[in-house]
Amino acid sequence: MTLLMNDPVLTLAAGRRDALIGALLGDALGGMIARFRAWRLRRRHVRALMAMDDRALLDLGIGRSEIDHAVAHGRAAEPELPAPSNSNAPAGRRRAA
C-alpha cells in the first residue's frame, strides 16, 4: 500500500485530475457569475426604462408593456428602404464615361 502512495505516476495523475476538477469548477462558477451580472444589468435597464414617462418611451419606439422584451431581445430591425433612383437619368440608357 505504501508503494502505491509514493508512486510518481499516480501522484502526477492525481495532480492532473485535481487541476481538471478545479478548472471545471472555475469555469462553471465563472459562468454563473457572468449570468448573474448580466441579469442584474438587464434589471437595471428595465428599472431605468420603467422610470420614464409614456411619451419618452414612445419616442424610443416602445410601449411600457414591451420594456422587458426590448431589454432582453432588442427592438426589431426597421426594414431598409430601397435606394432612391435618379429621376434625372433617362430610363434604360447608360451614360458613356
Image (cartoon, grey):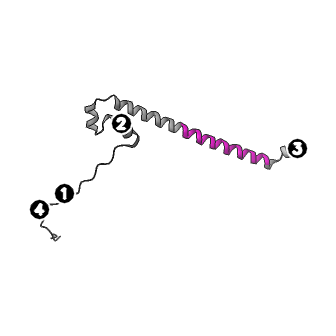
Q: Secondary structure at mark 2?
A: helix
Eye-nearest disc, 2 or 1: 2
> Could you tell which of marks 3 and 2 lies nearer the N-terminus?
3
Q: Amino acid at mark 2?
A: Ile
Q: CA distance from mark 3 to mark 2?
A: 65 Å
Q: Residues within 10 Å of mark 3 (few under 14, many from 20)?
A: few
Q: CA distance from mark 4 to mark 1?
A: 12 Å
The amino acid marked with disc number 3 is Met
Question: Looking at the picture, how far across and down is residue 40, in whole percent?
Answer: 46, 33
Chain-order first, disc 2 or disc 1 = 2
According to the picture, the residue beneath numbered tag 4 turns out to be 88
- Locate the C terminus and report the quarter of the image it occupies: bottom left
**Residue 44 within the magenta-colored segment of the rendering:** no
Quadrant the N terminus occupies: top right
Look at mark 2 in the image and give the residue it sits on: 67
Q: Name the mark on residue 84.
A: 1
Q: Is residue 23 magenta?
A: yes
Q: Is residue 75 left or right of residue 97?
A: right
- The amino acid pointed to by label 1 is Pro
Q: Amino acid at mark 4?
A: Asn
